[in-house]
Amino acid sequence: MFLLYNLFFLIFIFIYLPYFLLKGKYRQGAWMRLGFFSPSLLAKIKKPTIWLHAVSVGEISSAVSLLNNLRKKYPEYQLVISTVTTAGNRIAQQVASNKDLVVYLPYDLSFIVNKVIKKLSPQLFIILETEIWPNLISILAKKKIPLLIVNGRISNKSFKKYQKIKFLLSSVLRKVNFYCMQTKEDSQRIISLGAPREKVGITGNMKFDSEVPGDRYKKSDLGLKEENILFVAASTHPGEEEIILEIYKQIDRKNLRLLIAPRHIERIPQIEKLVQKQELVTQRLSDFFISLSADETMPARDRERLFSDTTLSSSTILLLDTIGELSSLFGIADIVFVGGSLVKRGGHNILEPAFFGKPILFGRYMFNFQEVAALFLQGKGAIVVDNAQELKEAICNLLDNRGRREELGKRARQILEENRGATERNMEVIGRFMLKPVRNVTE
């Protein structure tokens, strides 16, 4: 089976490599994915290392607390952070320390993976959530490098796909040293796919431990007055923006303002057309403010000067067209709708707005975050809506009742606090595999 997998992957690379190198979204880091590191990057490698892999933005964001704990407990190790997406790479660069090394995950071909492992010499490999790379996992096992799946989860969509290739996965899953899964359901799913029961534990969801930067923005940074109520529609998908915009026009409150943050920012032009159809105008955030993540040292008085002449009217819809800013912008939101839930996309992370104690709304399609959503609904820390009419009614109710907004946000924050601790439990598991002497993996 490995022969077929390698053959398929090799054919895929040869066919698509020219596209990746010329104009694909994976052009950045293409040579690194093939195992070629620049001299400057090679010079930065300081062995031994702990290698942590996170596919993209969400996984990197949930790993910040774990990274900080690893640096503190194992200062003699260099942390290597790998991603698959360019967006994830950018966020990894932001959260990395000067000592850390940020790379792209190599293509899962034996000769490439071998080459990169020799260069980076990891003493421990951590995969966040659940990505199964057969060659990577097999080579780590062969070299006796411990591999942990941390913050493991398997969505409904992924589980259905994995079940179709269970015959290939089961032998690979047995080679992982330990699985730190988020929930009982996640643990049952990974066991059913072939992971040994004795290697699976439930340690919780590290997103509850996420360290979200606060107070980076004021309402005035977006041209808002303090009395304006900011409604943030976060991580929206096609079919949801139309609903949100229609509701916004129907409500027609003078003090209400709307910020739409699509899940995929390349859809911004499409959303701008939807806004125009509603006879409203748009304002891209990148057009009128300097991202604080790009210039943390910019004095507050200078920021205020930039926006002193900007006042956002109710007919202007804000569009978030940058990556890595949404979590901070939740800090100035008054009401948050989390998208991917009115349409059948499975929902998105509701923990970041909960961190700021914001009232949270979402649709009924939260199947990728089923247990988290149920936890918040049971604790009355969020509101679920079935359709556009219910969403409109919920928003109007919150607009008319400040006390209700504050109570809902307070409960959301309380639920978050009560469920922290996954990072600490994962660190205990990691500690078991860091007791062994440093290995030579250059062969």
Image (tube, rainbow, N blue to C red):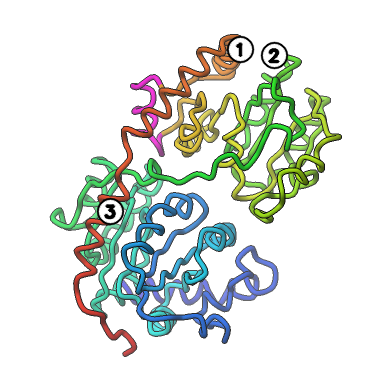
Task: Look at mark 1 in the image and give the residue it sits on.
Answer: 396
What's the amino acid at mark 1? Cys
Q: Which stretch did the figure color magenta? A: 367-380
Q: Which mark is residue 426?
A: 3
> From the viewer's perspective, is 51 left or right of 404?
left
3D distance between C-alphas at marks 3 and 2 = 46 Å
What is the magenta segment's predominant secondary structure?
A: helix
Residues marked 1 and 2 touching at CB (< 8 Å): yes
Q: Name the residue beneath numbered marker 2.
A: 251
Where residue 417 appears, x then y in whole percent?
36, 34
Q: Residue furthest left?
A: 198
Considering only vertical position in the picture, is 319 above or below 248? Answer: below
Residue at figure coordinates x 59%, y 49% from the top left: 324
Is the residue 99 above or below the residue 209 in the image?
below
Asked if residue 361 can be seen in this view, the reply is no
- Horizontal placement of 332 versus 429: left or right? right
Task: Identify which residue is drawn at 36% across, 46% down.
Answer: 206
Asked whether residue 220 is drawn in magenta, I would say no
> Quick check: 138 left or right of 293?
left
Q: Which mark is nearer the camera, 3 or 2?
A: 3
Query: Residue most toward the bottom?
Result: 443
Q: Mark 1 vs mark 3: which is more N-terminal? A: 1
- Residues marked 3 and 2 touching at CB (< 8 Å): no
Q: Earlier in the sequence, mark 1 or mark 2?
A: 2
Q: Nearer the viewer, residue 291 or 338?
A: 291
- At label 2, the amino acid type is Ile
Residue at 66%, 22% (x, y): give it: 229
> Which tag, 3 or 2, sits closer to the chain's start?
2
Check disc 1 and report its element: helix, strand or loop. helix
In the picture, measured across the screen, residue 72 lies left or right of residue 309, that is left
Tally of numbered discs: 3
Cα–Cα span, label 1 and label 2? 7 Å
